[in-house]
Image: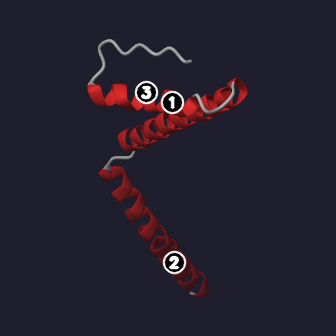
Amino acid sequence: MINMKHDNLPLKLRELQSCIEAELEKYDEEERGVILNRFLNQLEMKRHRANRLTDIKEVWRAPYIWLIVAGGIALPVLLYVIFVWSSLLLEA
């Protein structure tokens, strides 16, 4: 049996831990290890995903996004105007 300390935990958390222990008892040691490793990997991936999103939110504030959008719209127009004016200058 897996020994988990139940001393200072809220009642709902204790119930969840006992349910997890009961479910894990149905499997042998090797399968338990695989299940627990998979569970830990999922928790780590969830934490990394959350950290990644907060990092992106900290770096890319609203003004930066609007500047990038405005630059993306203005750049093709600017290049077109330069092309037209340079063509007119070459013809003259």
Residue at the spot 58% in from the left edge and 82% down from the top edge: 87
Q: Is residue 86 left or right of residue 57?
A: right
- State which quarter of the image contains the N terminus: top right
Residue denoted by label 3:
18
Residue denoted by label 2:
80
Q: Amino acid at mark 3?
A: Ser
* 38 to 7, vertically: above or below: below
Distance of label 2 from label 3 (alpha carbons): 69 Å
* 57 to 47, vertically: above or below: below
Circle 1/circle 3 CB separation < 8 Å? yes
Q: Mark 3: which secondary structure? A: helix
The x, y position of residue 20, in whole percent, is 48, 31
Sequence-wise, the earlier of marks 2 and 1 is 1
Residue denoted by label 1:
22
Q: Mark 1: which secondary structure? A: helix
Q: Mark 2: which secondary structure? A: helix
Residue at the spot 37% in from the left edge and 55% down from the top edge: 65
